[in-house]
Amino acid sequence: MPFIGAKLFRNANQSISNGANTPIIFDRIDYDFGVLTDLSLLNRILIPASGIYSIGGEITWDTTALGTLRALTLNAQNPTEILADIREGPVGISLSQEVRTE
């Protein structure tokens, strides 16, 4: 079976509203084997067939204020949440979050 996969990035900062779920708009496709991405919908990967897939996401947040919650979620057919990492951001330093599933 041929490899099917895609890797997308966001290189520039993106403004995230407080208290609202905000899709990350990717600005670079590293690779796309299997036509999983659509340049007009760069906040999602389209899975074309049933099967077992390895899916992940990673984000680094800028410094935060006291009590700021940071959430990284993977959704299927929004708003169905597959998994999430939600935690309070440390004060004065950046926070990295990562989620993976298979």
Image: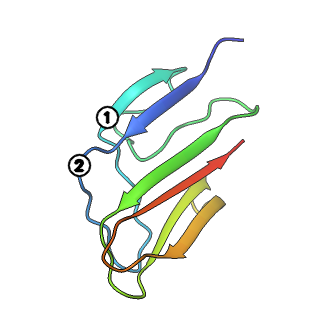
- The answer to whether marks 1 and 2 mark residues whose Cβ atoms lie closer than 8 Å is no
Residue 81 lies, in percent from the top left, at: 64, 61
Pointer 1: what residue? Answer: 28
Residue 70 in sight in this render: yes
Whole-percent x, y for residue 24 in the image: 38, 54
Snapshot quadrant of residue 65: bottom left
Q: Is residue 50 left or right of residue 73?
A: right
Q: How far across and how far down the image is residue 75, in percent?
A: 59, 55
CA separation, marks 1 and 2?
Answer: 10 Å
Position of residue 58 measured from the top left corner of the image (x, y, whole percent) = 48, 50
The earlier-in-sequence mark between 1 and 2 is 2
Residue type at tag 1 = Arg
In the rendered view, how is the structure colored? rainbow
Q: Which residue is mark 2?
A: 12
Q: Tell me the SS state at disc 2.
A: loop
Quadrant, the C terminus? top right
Q: Dot 1, how many residues are within 10 Å of its Cα: few (below 14), some (14-19), or many (20+)?
A: few
Q: In the image as oriented, which residue stretches furthest toward the right?
A: 51
- 32 or 71, which is in the foreground? 71
The tag on residue 4 is: none
Residue under the point 65% across and 12% down: 2
Residue 37: which quarter of the image?
top left
